């Protein structure tokens, strides 16, 4: 498989998973939240300072359709992660000996 085709296929699969399948992820609490509920100190939790942010709670603020909101947030997360990774790659790559 050519490298270009591999990258296109990987990008398509990533966007499909982030944009479509992420809606079906578990809504159960994560490990720390589960332990806090079991032990009984969940009531002491304070809201996150970013809890009112644009991408809070795995969704896009302002989008009423939950499926679309979660999918868009997933795609934005993939794009942001890719941009940061690509930028780091360009910064840290080896220069030609020319």
Image: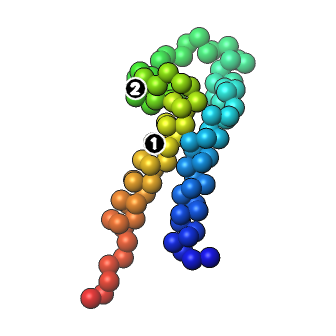
Tell me the quarter of the picture where residue 31 sits: top right
Secondary structure at badge 2 equals: loop
Q: Quadrant of the N terminus?
A: bottom right
42 up-or-down from 33: above or below: above
24 up-or-down from 38: above or below: below
The circle drawn on residue 76 is 1
Left or right: residue 25 versus residue 89 is: right
Q: Which residue is depicted at the point 56% across and 56% down?
A: 12
Residue 31 visible (yes or no): no
The x and y percentages for residue 61 are: 43, 25
> What crowding class fits label 1: few (fewer than 14 Cα within 10 Å), some (14-19), or many (20 or more)?
some
* Residue sitting farthest toward the bottom: 98
The circle drawn on residue 55 is none
Q: Which residue is depicted at the point 52% across and 40% down?
A: 74
Name the residue nearer the viewer: 87 or 10.
Answer: 10
Give me the C-alpha separation between circle 2 and circle 1: 14 Å
Q: Which residue is depicted at the point 58% across and 68% down?
A: 6
Name the residue nearer the viewer: 85 or 71.
Answer: 71
Q: Which residue is depicted at the point 27% across and 88% down?
A: 98
How is the protein colored in the picture?
rainbow
43 up-or-down from 53: above or below: above
Residue 30 visible (yes or no): yes
Which residue position is annotated with label 2?
A: 53
The x and y percentages for residue 70 are: 55, 32
87 up-or-down from 55: above or below: below
Secondary structure at badge 1 equals: helix
* Residue sitting farthest toward the top: 43
> What crowding class fits label 2: few (fewer than 14 Cα within 10 Å), some (14-19), or many (20 or more)?
few
Sequence-first disc among 2 and 1: 2
Q: Nearer the viewer, mark 2 or mark 1?
A: 1
The x and y percentages for residue 75 are: 50, 43
């Amino acid at each position: 498989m050519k490298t270009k085709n591999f990258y296109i296929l990987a990008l398509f699969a990533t966007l499909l998973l982030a944009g479509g399948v992420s809606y079906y992820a578990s809504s159960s609490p994560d490990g720390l939240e589960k332990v806090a509920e079991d032990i009984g100190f969940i009531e002491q939790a304070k809201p996150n300072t970013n809890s009112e942010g644009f991408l809070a709670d795995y969704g896009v603020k302002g989008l009423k359709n939950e499926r679309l909101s979660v999918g868009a947030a997933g795609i934005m997360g993939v794009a942001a992660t890719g941009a940061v990774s690509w930028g780091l790659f360009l910064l840290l790559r080896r220069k030609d000996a020319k």
